[in-house]
Amino acid sequence: MIASLRAESLKTRKRWANWILFGILLLTLLLIGYVLVYFVLSNPPRNFQSRVPARILKREVFPENLIPNVLAFTSSIGAAIMIILGGLSTASEYGWLTVQTILIQKPSRSAVLLGKLAMLAIITLLIAVVTLAATALTSYLLVTIDGSSSTWPSATVLLKGFGALWLEFAVWTAFGMFLGVAFRSTAAAIGGGLTYLFVGEALLGQVFRNTDVVKEVLRFLPGINAGAVHASFRLTFRSPDTATQLVDATRGTITLLAYLVAFTVLALLIFRRRDVGGS
Amino acid sequence: MGLKQSLAVETRGLTKRYSTGVLAVADLNLQVRTGEVYGFLGPNGAGKTTTLRMLSGLLRPTSGTATVAGGVPGSPGSLARMGAMVETPAFYPYLSGRDNLRVVARYAGVPRSRVEPVLQQVDLTDRARHKFRTYSTGMKQRLGVAAALLKEPELLILDEPTSGLDPQGTVEMRELIKQLRHGGRTVLLSSHLLNEVELTCDRVGVIAKGKLVAEGTVDELRARSGGRALLVRATPVDQAQRVLESLLLPGQVQVRDGVFSLAVDPSQAASINRRLVADGVDVSELQVSEQSLEDVFLQLTEQAPTPTLPHKGEGG
């Protein structure tokens, strides 16, 4: 597995697509999730209407709300980027036929895929660290520009928030990676993953949420469970929103971990057993 | 551990039926001796690549067994002692040739210092810093061979190494293959090009429709399928055919474009000529023809029966 991990690190580092994806994530988060929100709420348009005044809403981008704001933003764009990252990491090997080049070297099939998984775990960890650090810095700059005062979340909240962010990144990356192995096609893996994220689960959640049967199904879906984890980190100016959550944060965390294991095991089973090449 | 009984590759009843129902390889028994260059010859679609994929561990056989470089195909023990280029050389297009070899070296657990020597060996050092996607077919093939050589393997499997190469590239690849056998290395080379195996291989196995139809040295194969032939141009053709068929066995006489090819000992040329002339046939040309490997190949592959093996559950 170490040999595979070392090979993966070289491939990952030199692949521009990975850097571009990370750049998109970071830029979108900082520019739209922080800078744009701050300037719009600092100078709200005349027709701006909200139960919460803009000067309070603006505090969303301040350090006190670092964790809920980052988690809220990354639940959509972050999940999408991670699905693409995971899908690219495995499906490209089939597209370029490099899977057969790899598999005729020394490591076993399990070692090859576990090395890839370990690399993805490291990447998602690094992305989570840099994302949190960059948003914290941006948040600090904005509160300084604003001349307001704010407090940082406690170390416990920061640690839990970081764990939640990494877990969510890891689950969606594993989902993309699994789809890449299952479909052996980059387009199908990414298309399928994004369709599920933005159409499948979202549609069920928004349109059929009040149907009892669908509600039971929703309790088991990754997006809903990720949302439950997010909800446990609430914005300082919002009251706890437990009524709309189908599951609590603990169950959400356990379900996400179960998905992480399931995607990994399924991908391993398929990768180990399936023929490479031939008709 | 030495290679078992001086065989680098041994298969017993190796069979592959794809999920589509296509029987690609049927009951293949192959023996490649250590230190030889073995040509695996067959027309396109004969089952060569499927066999090599099974030997590399990429495909699981439907039935049968194989031992490759002393181990089960695809096992780390076997893979550590073999290098392979199966079908198209496949590398990361965004990496340079050198970086691609570094990636492969890392997977194989080979020190980075092996990369430059193999680049030199395949004459790619000058282009090693360029991206793989900019490589010509010949350069891709050479990089594929370089990757296969990284482990300094005892067994080298090359699938159609001259495929897509121009004449110059083909000659260079052939020379490279000749060099690769040095040091007692075994080379298993698949090809549909007859002159390629004739020029580079010690022994040849001919596969057609998934079955091994002949195996031996090029000379042995020639001899087995009749060796030399007597060519006769004579008129009238009908009369000549009647005379020759009365004189020889039916399978010994073949006519094509007015020329008879007689599978007889050339020493019979004079008596055959006398008999034809005596029966009023004009003989305008009579010569001994060395049967080329191409003739042998065509003869063997055209005669190959379509393999029939029971489907799963049919027993046997």
Image: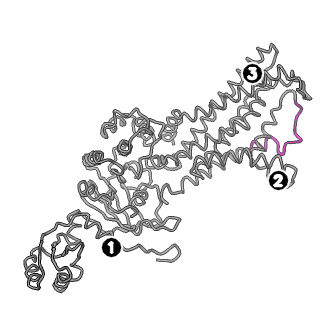
Three-letter code for the amino acid on which mark 2 is drawn: Val
- Using the image, name the chain to which the residue with label 1 belongs: B
Mark pair 1, 3: CA separation = 79 Å
Residue occupied by mark 2: A214
- In front of the other: A76 or A113: A76
10 Å crowding of disc 1: few (<14), some (14-19), many (20+): few
- Place residue A20 in its image quadrant: top right
Mark nearer the N terminus (2 vs 3): 3
Question: Could you tell me residue A95's position as x and y percent?
Answer: 52, 47
Residue occupied by mark 3: A139
Question: Could you tell me residue A169's position as x and y percent?
Answer: 67, 38
10 Å crowding of disc 2: few (<14), some (14-19), many (20+): some
Contact, mark 2 vs mark 1 (Cβ under 8 Å): no
> Is A241 included in the stretch rendered in magenta?
yes
- Is A67 above or below relative to A1? above
Q: Are marks 1 and 3 on the same chain?
A: no
Residue extending furthest toward the right: A51
Residue extending furthest toward the top: A147
- Is B315 above or below relative to A254? below
User: Which residue is at 32% across, 53% downward?
Assistant: B2
Residue occupied by mark 1: B303
Q: Is residue B137 visible?
A: yes
Three-letter code for the amino acid on which mark 3 is drawn: Ser
Q: Nearer the viewer, mark 2 or mark 1?
A: 1
Q: Which residues are magenta?
A: A238-254
How many callouts does the rendering have?
A: 3
- Place residue A82 in its image quadrant: top right
Mark pair 2, 1: CA separation = 64 Å
